[in-house]
Image (tube, coloured by chain):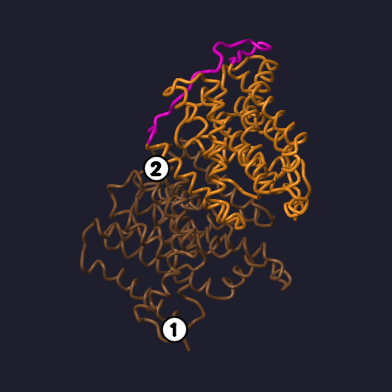
Chain colours: A orange, B brown
């Protein structure tokens, strides 16, 4: 996935600027995906292997809403994210709820859902890669690096959405209840929090964020029915590096991974971009399994 | 469970699997049709993959989503060794077992010491990156095209058939011995109550690492034979789809029984051959099937064996 690749700069300062800028854009997408992944795990204990599927569905639904129904792009992206969020709740209610206590069944069910969705998308849209147009056309030069307006929009959308999530989690009743459930589910139930409602909220937010990431990246990276597996893996790496269940750690780790991958891609070889995340994962699992933030695990 | 401590049911299941095995050995007497034999050998490969998956994940309930990593690793090692040195299969198989066992030990060392959901995710991560790297580093691996023209196992159709069948039988018997004894009991106990096993003075982390390593080594042997039989290795040998197919076969058959995944693999491979027209819906059918099985018969189709045997009168009265 060398999708933010541009012509190399001769001077070293230009190179560093480029790595920082493109790494940030990559990090934004990782942050969106991984935040949702860690949220639903922290709250409901669901390790959702269909998380990449939400990302994929976000992209394909946006495509359908925009190209087939002719809805304006910005609205189509928003509607697609909402729809996928509702789909997330449906998945949780119908399939996962009876099995939630068994980790292994949740894993198997979500992976089965991911493959079923992949096949359905393949039947409907075919294997060909597809794109949606940029939100805003044209590009601009920042510090001598050409960046398209769409990439700037990715950063802005990510910042707004993550800030919004933070505000919801810390300043609304729902958000505080969510944090409470993530700390101690039984305790939260004792003080009268309806955990099912909180699970709905967490699942919705999680699927919404993933779908949004898939939708805003698809002008740059074409969508295919198998696009879900790498983001899922990246989300996992980010979550482990950041510390399982920690939102701040996850966001920090997302940008760290974005920069590190871009750095490797630019300086060493674009072939090694995908191996970076695995190397990072291995190093963290050996030396610091609890991640950047987070307490030491057993 | 078919092979439980109950002696009468254990006898009927031993009879059933014995007959099945015998049938496999005499199939070539009735038909030397290339197609029929190749369907059976495909089934044997999947039986190796699914049962070797089961020995770790079925017994410990830690889901391994990247079993194809071992198939691919063994496949590429086979291709390299065959291409550069031309060693005979009988020497290559142990090398593959050692490589995959070592890989299993490494992954196990990384994750099985920790509590938490690390294992399932890291198996996906390793398999995905290995698949991606195989395509990227095309100078060594041939990229998407893979490495063709690996020498065949024995140069004769029947020779190949019996080589694969004997490998499968040995692995199956080894797994039965392994899981029906001390080790299987410990693994099962660990998955149910790890603290009490720890309290008995058993290093559960090391136990799990060993079991995972054995699972990898056996799958590596299977992967190597698979590669020889196809005379080709490519990124498809490492795909996530393959890992998931193996997992689905084992779950449909019945987790933690060895005999269940054996039946699951056999039935799904035969089903697959009978429904060639449904090729493009196959994965969809599989994924829906596993969801249904989890809700209808969470212990897999092997759990239908005992009531069925009773209905058919194969089983003696309970003493």
Label ID, residue B140: none
A108 to the left or right of B264: right
Sequence-wise first label, 1 or 2: 1
Name the front one of labels 1 and 2: 1
Residue A133: say if magenta.
yes
Local crowd at mark 1 within 10 Å, few (<14), some, or many (≥20)? some
- Per the model, the C-alpha gap separating discs 1 and 2 is 50 Å
Question: Residue B303 sits in which quadrant?
Answer: bottom left
Marker disc for residue B147: 2
Q: Chain of mark 1?
A: B
- Location of residue A275 with respect to B43 vertically, above or below: above
Which contiguous range is marked in magenta? Answer: A124-149
* Relative horizontal placement of residue B198, taking residue A270 as reference (left or right): right
Give the x, y percent position of residue A269.
58, 29
Identify residue for label 1.
B8
Q: Residue at x 68, y 25 (%)?
A: A160
* Residue A144 within the magenta-colored segment of the rendering: yes
* Relative vertical location of residue B99 with respect to residue B142 in this rendering, above or below: below
Would residue A12 be seen by someone viewing this image from the given angle? yes
Among all residues in the image, which is located at the extreme front?
A192
Q: Answer yes or no: are tags 1 and 2 on the same subunit.
A: yes
Which residue, as the protein is rendered here, is positioned at the far bottom?
B319
């Amino acid at each position: 996935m060398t999708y933010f690749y541009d012509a190399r700069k001769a001077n070293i300062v230009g190179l560093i600027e480029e790595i920082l800028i493109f790494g940030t854009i990559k990090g934004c997408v990782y942050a969106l995906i991984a935040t949702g992944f860690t949220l639903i795990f922290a709250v409901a204990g669901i390790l959702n292997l269909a998380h990449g599927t939400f990302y994929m569905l976000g992209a394909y639904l946006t495509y359908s809403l925009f190209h087939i129904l002719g809805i304006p792009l910005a609205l189509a992206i928003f509607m697609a994210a909402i729809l996928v969020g509702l789909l997330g709740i449906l998945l949780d209610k119908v399939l996962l709820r009876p099995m939630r206590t068994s980790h292994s069944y949740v894993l198997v069910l979500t992976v089965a859902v991911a493959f079923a969705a992949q096949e359905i998308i393949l039947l409907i849209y075919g294997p060909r890669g597809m794109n949606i147009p940029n939100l805003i056309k044209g590009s601009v030069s920042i510090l001598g690096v050409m960046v398209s307006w769409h990439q700037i929009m990715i950063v802005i959308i990510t910042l707004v959405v993550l800030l919004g999530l933070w505000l919801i989690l810390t300043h609304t009743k729902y958000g505080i209840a969510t944090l409470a459930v993530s700390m101690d589910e039984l305790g939260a139930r004792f003080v009268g929090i309806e955990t099912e409602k909180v699970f709905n909220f967490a699942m919705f937010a999680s699927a919404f964020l993933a779908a949004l990431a898939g939708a805003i990246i698809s002008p740059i990276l074409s969508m295919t029915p198998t696009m879900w597996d790498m983001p899922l893996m990246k989300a996992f790496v980010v979550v482990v590096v950041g510390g399982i269940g920690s939102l701040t750690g996850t966001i920090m780790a997302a940008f760290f991974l974005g920069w590190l991958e871009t750095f490797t891609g630019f300086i060493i070889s674009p072939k090694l971009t995908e191996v970076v995340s695995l190397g990072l994962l291995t190093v963290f699992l050996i030396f610091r399994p609890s991640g950047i933030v987070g307490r030491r695990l057993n | 469970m078919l092979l439980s401590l109950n002696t009468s049911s254990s006898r009927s299941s031993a009879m059933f699997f014995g007959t099945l095995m015998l049938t496999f050995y005499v199939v070539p007497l009735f038909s030397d049709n290339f197609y029929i034999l190749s369907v059976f050998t495909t089934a044997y490969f999947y039986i190796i993959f699914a049962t070797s998956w089961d020995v770790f994940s079925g017994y410990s309930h830690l889901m391994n989503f990247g079993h194809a990593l071992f198939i691919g690793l063994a496949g590429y090692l086979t291709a390299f060794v065959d291409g550069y040195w031309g060693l005979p299969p009988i020497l290559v198989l142990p090398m593959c077992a050692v490589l995959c066992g070592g890989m299993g030990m490494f992954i196990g060392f990384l994750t099985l010491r920790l509590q938490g959901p690390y294992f399932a995710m890291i198996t996906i991560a390793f398999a995905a990156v290995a698949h991606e790297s195989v395509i990227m580093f095309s100078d060594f691996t041939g990229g998407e095209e893979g490495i063709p023209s690996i020498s065949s196992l024995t140069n004769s159709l029947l020779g190949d058939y019996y080589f694969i069948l004997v490998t499968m039988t040995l692995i199956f018997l080894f797994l039965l011995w392994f899981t029906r004894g001390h080790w299987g009991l410990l693994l099962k106990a660990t998955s149910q109550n790890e603290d009490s096993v720890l309290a008995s003075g058993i290093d559960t982390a090391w136990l799990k690492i060993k079991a995972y390593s054995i699972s990898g080594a056996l799958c590596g042997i299977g992967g190597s034979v698979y590669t020889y039989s196809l005379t080709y290795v490519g990124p498809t040998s490492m795909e996530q789809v393959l890992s998931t197919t193996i997992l689905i076969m084992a779950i449909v058959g019945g987790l933690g029984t060895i005999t269940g995944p054996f039946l699951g693999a056999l039935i799904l491979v035969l089903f697959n051959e009978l429904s060639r027209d449904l090729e493009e819906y196959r994965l969809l059918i599989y994924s829906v099937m596993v969801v249904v099985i989890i809700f209808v018969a969470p212990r897999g189709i092997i759990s239908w064996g005992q009531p069925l045997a009773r209905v058919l009168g194969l089983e003696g009265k309970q003493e």
